[in-house]
Amino acid sequence: MAKKMHFKGIIFDLDGVIVSTDEYHYQAWKEVSDEYGIYFDYEINERLRGVSRMESVDIIMEKAERHYTEKEKTDFATRKNNVYRRLLSGLSSRDILPGVESALDLLAQRGVLLAIGSSSKNTPVILERIGLAERFQAISDGNHISKSKPDPEVFLLAANRLKLAPEDCLVVEDAVAGVTAALRAGMAVLAVGSASQDKRATFRALDLSFSDLIKFF
Ligand code: BG6
Ligand code: MG
């Protein structure tokens, strides 16, 4: 079957697609893991891409020397988030990834509906800090869903909020879990960055260059 090439709306993942928060996540998890004496490195951080906060704790604790209770895991996640929020106060429009602003401008001019579909509960604060909060017609994030990527819930909610059918939406994702979520939602997905080698993706690109995006609308 030929790939559908034209869409009415686009749902962007946030972290790693719109804005570079990788290093902030890494530093926050590293600081708290060091406090607890749990090994953490960039390779483990890479496995947390697109994964919810509590599921991230389970991945990090695979390296722990003892069992942690659910309460201890929640405390660990809260401490990480406190450090992360402190680091996010340094976030600005300089952290917007290359190509994003010009792509958003052109898509908006063409009347394409724009949404965010992110696992992050920090989505509102991140969008405010980078000055893009007003650019999206719908936001679907970690505060609105009960099942994180690879579950399709976050993208189905975004499409619903745009009043579009799944097949009219293109998702842009940098996480393998997010590519799975988009496909399970019945949406086409453009995989970028870390997911750009994922052969299941409908389309693939190294980064979000505006010429790559505009051809879909
Ligand atoms: C995703 C990130 O966007 O959000 C993950 O790729 C992160 O690394 C997840 O764990 C949840 O983020 P937050 O901000 O709710 O802790
Ligand atoms: Mg991402």
Image (tube, grey):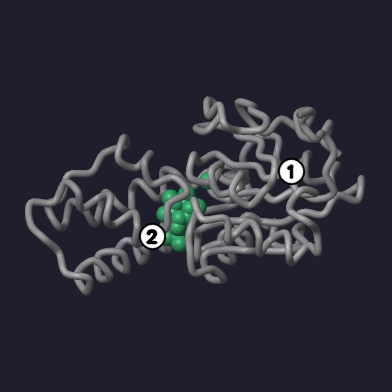
Label number found at residue 139? none
Residue under label 1: 101
Does label 2 or label 1 sit earlier along the sequence? Answer: 2
Residue 43: % across, % down: 31, 35
- Whether the residue carrying mark 2 lies under 8 Å from ligand 1 is answered with yes
Question: Marks 1 and 2: in contact by CB < 8 Å?
Answer: no
**For the residues marked 2 and 1, what is the alpha-carbon distance in whole angstroms?**
27 Å
Q: Which residue lies furthest to the front in this view?
A: 1
Is 124 situated above or below 43? below
Q: Is mark 2 on a helix, strand or loop?
A: helix
Task: Please name which of the two marks, 2 or 1, marks the residue nearer to the observer.
Answer: 2
Is 48 situated above or below 208? below
- Please tell me which residue is depicted at 29% across the width and 66% down the height of the picture: 79
- Please tell me which residue is depicted at 92% across the width and 45% down the height of the picture: 110
Is 156 situated above or below 24? below
- Please tell me which residue is depicted at 79% across the width and 28% down the height of the picture: 2
Q: Image quarter for residue 4?
A: top right
Q: Three-letter amino acid code at disc 2?
A: Arg
Relative to residue 157, is residue 27 drawn left or right?
Answer: left
Q: Three-letter amino acid code at disc 1?
A: Glu
- Please tell me which residue is depicted at 85% across the width and 41% down the height of the picture: 106
User: Is 41 in front, or is 47?
Assistant: 47
Position of the C terminus by quadrant? top right
Relative to residue 126, is residue 100 drawn left or right?
Answer: right
Position of the N terminus by quadrant? top right
Residue 160: % across, % down: 73, 65
Residue under label 2: 53
Relative to residue 102, is residue 179 drawn left or right?
Answer: left
